[in-house]
Image (cartoon, grey):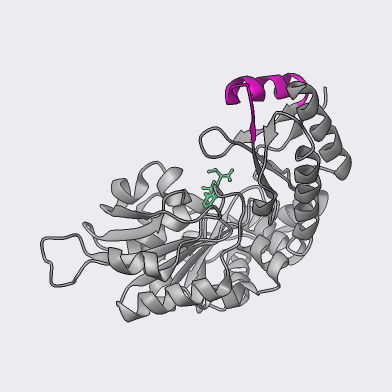
Amino acid sequence: MKLIDLRSDTVTKPSAGMRKAMYDAEVGDDVYKEDPTVNKLEEYAAELLGKEAALFVPTGVMGNQICLNVLTSPGDEVICERHAHIFQYESGSPARLSGLQLSLVDGNKKGIFTPDQVEPLIRPTSAYYMAQTRLIEIENTHNRAGGTINPIDNIKALSQLARKYNLYIHLDGARIWNAYVETGIKPDEYASHFDSVSCCLSKGLGAPIGSIIAGKKEFIKEAFAVRKAWGGGMRQVGVIASAGLYALKNNIERLKEDHQKAKLLAAGLSEIKNLSIDLDLVETNIVMFSPNGISIEEFQLKCKANGLLLGTGKVGEIRAVTHMDVSVDDIKVATGIIKSVLA
Ligand code: TLP
């Protein structure tokens, strides 16, 4: 039986063109900065993000965590949204790896929080007995809220607030490419409001592995040392950096198709009885919904038995993510499977 896999946009397999680029990649030892393909990827990504420098890292989690580590000291506090990936899905790493505590803001249903909500959370620098607020983190698009886009004016205002209080500001832009194709706001425009940015190559862009972090030269120099300290110094890694470079050059604009597929799926789901969905949240390639009268686990198992793999979102929610390895037909079949499971 063919399985339609909507668990995540991370499940894609490298295309023929990407595999060829990997096969042909020139390589060297990246710990000595001698891998020409990694160097090319880092230069290209830095330019795309309008930053002085960039660093290739194995995963989005490592990317976020290196950025937090470089910009803070143990005992500092980081402000982020309650459903942020760094809080929900990164294994407690801000505490484990950098001795940080997180101060959580309740965003709206789209995971968006405003400067008015953040300002009262900033600790006075005179209060030596309090953790010191050091950094604000924003996730765009916001995964757990359903792939929602943070409005650029809000990002600007949060960035200005960070400047006013001498705080750093970090972007978890794992899916910044999705925000870009939907709004037309370029990745470098988004990135210009942040000290550090982390972006994934292995989600909708279809690379098998890899993320990029970007920022000032000095920042990337320190990030390079932290990556090594955490065991992330890689060798002839041009074989995978080539996939990332191919992804950045070929697979950004096509993300629009994934957004159309998500809208198609959401529209189909909204007509199914025993299912709740907020269409207002479907802005990019993620669709969150709740099946009624059945547990999430049982619903997932029944869908799987019928050939459809689905993930989870917030408590009581199913997450379906569209990507380049599912077709419009697959989306129609998936909608039919969900309908029959809930009938
Ligand atoms: N997210 C994964 C899961 O961890 C939920 C997914 O399937 O969506 N930031 C954001 C916003 C992410 O969504 C993810 C991955 C990461 C960072 C971490 O990337 P990886 O998995 O490469 O470490």
Q: Residue at x 59, y 78 (%)?
A: 189
Q: Position of residue 70 (x, y in %)?
A: 34, 64
State whether residue 83 appears in this view. Answer: yes
Q: Residue at x 54, y 66 (%)?
A: 34
Note whether 287 is above or below 304 in the view shown: below
Q: Which residues are magenta?
A: 290-307
- Extreme residue in the right direction: 329
Q: Position of residue 274 (x, y in %)?
A: 70, 28
Note whether 216 is above or below 69 in the view shown: below
Q: Position of residue 212 (x, y in %)?
A: 54, 62
Q: Residue at x 72, y 66 (%)?
A: 181
In the displayed structure image, the side of residue 292 where residue 84 appears, left or right: left
Viewer-nearest residue: 89 or 275: 275
- Number of labelled discs? 0
Viewer-nearest residue: 45 or 37: 45
State whether residue 233 appears in this view. Answer: no
- Extreme residue in the left direction: 129
Q: Residue at x 75, y 30 (%)?
A: 273
In the displayed structure image, the side of residue 258 where residue 212 appears, left or right: left
Viewer-nearest residue: 171 or 67: 171
Q: Is residue 226 magenta?
A: no
